[in-house]
Image (tube, rainbow, N blue to C red):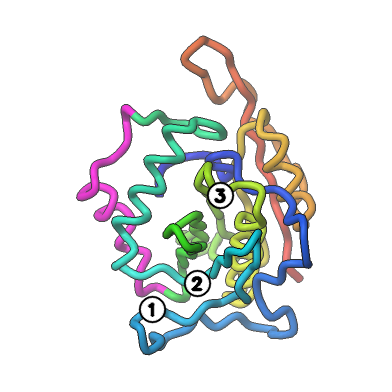
Amino acid sequence: MYPASAAAGGCAARYRGAPVSATTAAHSRFTPPREARPEGRPAPVAPSIPYHGRTVTVRLATPGDLPGLHALGLAILADGRGQVTTLEHADDMVAHARRIEGYFGRPDDAAIFVAVDDEGIAGEGLVRRYQPALTRHAGVLSLGVHPRAQRRGYGRALVRAMCAWANGAGLRRLELFMRADNARARALYESEGFVHEGTRARFVRLPDGTEVDDLILVRFFA
């Protein structure tokens, strides 16, 4: 998980096929699975998504996913779209693990989801609750999809899983930050109920000197 706009890597847009349901919407609270399946992986939190003969499963990440998450982050940074840092400034594996390992085992305050297909971890999403006492009803998410796996519905499935977790954890407000030049990601978020709340003007400066606004999008839960 790298510091980046929520639309890391120009995340997936619409799934061009059967409707994708990332969670069971009828559940009023989302309970992260606590027991591993026989093969040692947590149970999926979403139905498998078919795509041109392949399937992807969205599930909670485990510490064993750290190498795959690190490789995913490097691929997204190398692609560059939607990012606020560069590959040259990427963490090594040890620093990356140290930075995100604290999110494991905190089901009330944070969750990391992964989208896994036949080639490995193809996407990740982090959703976390703000910790100050007067802001614990609010949270923030970030999302990244591997360049090879975009436009397959993976991003949408991850967004839905994160929103279900946020709603189930009692959050009333969920926000994200994204570069204004990532129109495809904005379309995804707005189709999932997020609205534009504010703009951090000229927040990102690209290597060629171009300055890009950063957008704040938010979704409220009843």
Amino acid at circle 3: Ala
Report helix, strand or loop for mark 1: loop
Residue pictured at 35% horizontal, 70% vertical: 62
Q: Could you say whether the residue bearing mark 3 is in a helix, strand or loop?
A: helix
What is the magenta segment's predominant secondary structure?
helix
Is the residue marked by circle 2 packed among few (<14), some (14-19), or many (20+) residues within 10 Å?
A: many
Badge 1 amino acid: Arg
Evaluate if marks 3 and 2 touch, with contact meaning CB atoms under 8 Å apart: no
208 vs 68, left or right, is right
Query: Which x, y percent locates residue 143?
Result: 54, 51
Q: Amino acid at mark 2?
A: Arg
CA separation in Å, label 1 and label 2: 9 Å
Query: Decide: marks 1, 2 in contact (CB < 8 A)?
Result: yes
Which residue corresponds to the image point at 54% horizontal and 24% vertical from the top-left?
204
Asked whether 138 or 14 is in front, the reply is 14
Locate the C terminus by quadrant.
bottom right
Q: Earlier in the sequence, mark 3 or mark 1?
A: 1
In the picture, the disc for residue 149 is 3
Disc 1 marks which residue? 41
Instruction: Specify few, some or many for label 3: CA neighbours under 10 Å numbering under 14, 14-19, or 20 or more.
Output: some
Q: Which segment did they paint magenta?
A: 88-106
Q: Secondary structure at mark 2?
A: strand
N-term-proximal mark, 1 vs 2: 1
From the viewer's perspective, is residue 63 above or below residue 217? below
Q: Where is residue 126 shown, x and y percent of the image?
A: 49, 58
Question: From mark 3 to mark 2, how far is it between C-alphas?
Answer: 17 Å
Q: In this figure, which residue is indicated by the disc labeled 2?
A: 59
Find the residue positioned furthest to the front. 53
- Residue 96 colored magenta? yes
* Residue 63 marker: none
Say if 118 sits above or below 78 in the image.
Answer: below
